[in-house]
Image (tube, rainbow, N blue to C red):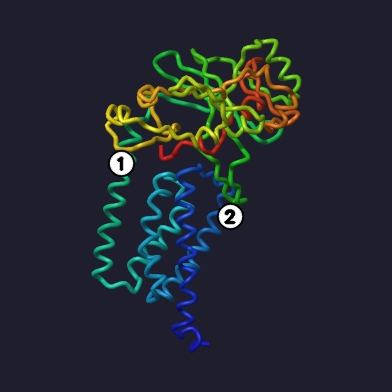
């Protein structure tokens, strides 16, 4: 058995596990940007993370002379920068991998010169990242006190709602925020809640003393009737993909010769405008043609081209069948705030409130 574990090939193969652990820490760093971490079962989560980290530390010390372990020892510490900043205070989860990263860095088989160079660079990374983070967060930190007074999930479980009270110098405010539940990552012991997709559906000043929220399940057809009663001129802005599903053109283009053409989003992105010598001179470019979708207002004006966006349409013009084709379920969640509707699943789907391409970078 001793001969087996002292074999260099055994150590090389086992050292691959250090890359797996390094990848795990890398994913953790990625999650820290886009997700808030909620430890749902602290004791079990701490035990599991500690146990895995101890096992990996033993394995990495055993294979410390191997290339993959040396490589992992370099990248573990920089990878922990973001989790430490984003999840500052969650030490039961952060400390075990951080200890592993520190111990293996100092005890790996890397030469002293390499440790000195990489150690200096890693220290600079930590100092610069911390400085930038705390300077930016302090600059944008509001001089107010915000308290969550109500929260809850919708009947379908697709959305969650929070009601926040903010105390400031202007009698405060009450804000209702909706977030998607379906995009969270639940790992049983730890829940990662997506961030950057919060939607404020109600902001009321001054701060309200009595607040009630109520979720209801309502039918698509009934919501359509209610909205038509409010106004026939309510508009929604659809995406190019949604317009294609309806078989409608997304843009109307008027060319320099006066001709007009309506087209789908796909066709619009393929339009090329040839440039005359006069246009090239005015635009100060040697290009003989330009893509229409890359033109700014001034360039379009010089080229004599105008574009009308047709994606904003009246809600009343959509039939129940078309709503179904756009992915609006027959029934869904509606939120009432003090008896007033502030959120309809219907509109959230049509206007893609929670599309991932609208997610904001969650560094602060």
Asked if residue 18 is positioned above or below residue 303 in the image, the reply reads below
Residue linked to disc 1: 132
Residue extending farthest bottom: 3
Mark number for residue 17? none
Quadrant position of the C terminus in the picture = top left
274 or 360, which is in the foreground? Answer: 274
Query: Badge 2, how many Cα within 10 Å: few under 14, some, many 20+?
Result: few
| Residue in the picture at 65% in, 10% down | 231
Is disc 2 placed on a helix, strand or loop?
Answer: helix
Front: mark 2 or 1: 1
Do labels 2 and 1 touch, CB within 8 Å?
Answer: no
Whether residue 196 is visible here, answered yes or no, is no
Between 302 and 62, which is closer to the camera in this rendering? Answer: 302
Whether residue 355 is visible here, answered yes or no, is yes
Residue found at x 60% / y 29%: 161
Q: Is residue 12 left or right of residue 210?
A: left
Q: Residue 341 appears at what percent x and percent y?
A: 64, 18
Residue 300 x/y as whole percent: 39, 25
Question: Reading the chain from its start, which is encountered first: label 2 or label 1?
Answer: 2
Q: Residues within 10 Å of mark 1 (few under 14, many from 20)?
A: few
Q: Position of residue 25 (x, y in %)?
A: 46, 57
Mark 1 lies on a secondary structure that is: helix
> Where is residue 241, by image quadrant?
top right
In depth, the one of 21 and 243 nearer the eye is 243
Nearer to me, 195 or 284: 284
Q: Residue at x 69, y 33 (%)?
A: 327
Question: On the rendered structure, is 225 left or right of 85?
Answer: right
Name the residue tied to disc 2: 44
């Amino acid at each position: 058995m001793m001969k087996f574990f002292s074999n260099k090939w055994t150590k090389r193969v086992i050292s691959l596990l250090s890359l797996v652990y390094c990848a795990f820490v890398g994913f953790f760093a990625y999650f820290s940007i886009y997700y808030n971490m909620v430890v749902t079962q602290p004791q079990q989560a701490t035990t599991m993370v500690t146990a895995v980290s101890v096992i990996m530390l033993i394995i990495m010390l055993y294979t410390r002379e191997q290339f993959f372990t040396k490589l992992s020892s370099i990248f573990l510490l920089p990878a922990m920068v973001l989790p430490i900043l984003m999840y500052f205070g969650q030490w039961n989860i952060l400390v075990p991998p951080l200890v592993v990263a520190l111990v293996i860095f100092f005890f790996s088989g890397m030469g002293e010169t390499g440790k000195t160079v990489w150690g200096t660079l890693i220290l600079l990374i930590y100092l610069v990242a911390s400085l930038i983070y705390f300077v930016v967060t302090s600059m944008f930190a509001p001089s107010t006190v915000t308290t969550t007074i109500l929260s809850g999930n919708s009947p379908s479980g697709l959305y969650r709602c929070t009601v926040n009270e903010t105390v400031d110098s202007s009698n405060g405010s009450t804000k209702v925020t909706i977030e998607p539940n379906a995009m969270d990552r639940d790992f049983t012991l730890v829940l990662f809640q997506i961030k950057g997709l919060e939607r404020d559906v109600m902001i009321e000043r001054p701060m309200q003393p009595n607040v009630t929220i109520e979720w209801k399940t309502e039918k698509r057809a009934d919501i359509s009737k209610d909205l038509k009663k409010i106004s026939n001129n309510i508009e929604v802005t659809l995406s190019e993909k949604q317009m294609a599903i309806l078989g409608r053109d997304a843009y109307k283009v008027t060319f320099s010769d006066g001709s007009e053409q309506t087209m789908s989003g796909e066709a619009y992105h393929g339009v090329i405008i040839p440039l005359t010598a006069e246009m090239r001179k005015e635009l100060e470019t040697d290009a003989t043609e330009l893509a229409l979708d890359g033109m700014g207002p001034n360039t379009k004006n010089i080229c004599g081209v105008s574009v009308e966006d047709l994606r904003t349409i009246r809600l009343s013009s959509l039939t129940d069948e078309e709503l179904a084709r756009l992915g609006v379920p027959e029934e869904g969640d509606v939120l009432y705030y003090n008896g007033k509707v502030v959120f309809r699943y219907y509109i959230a789907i049509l206007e893609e409130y929670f599309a991932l391409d609208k997610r904001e970078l969650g560094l602060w």
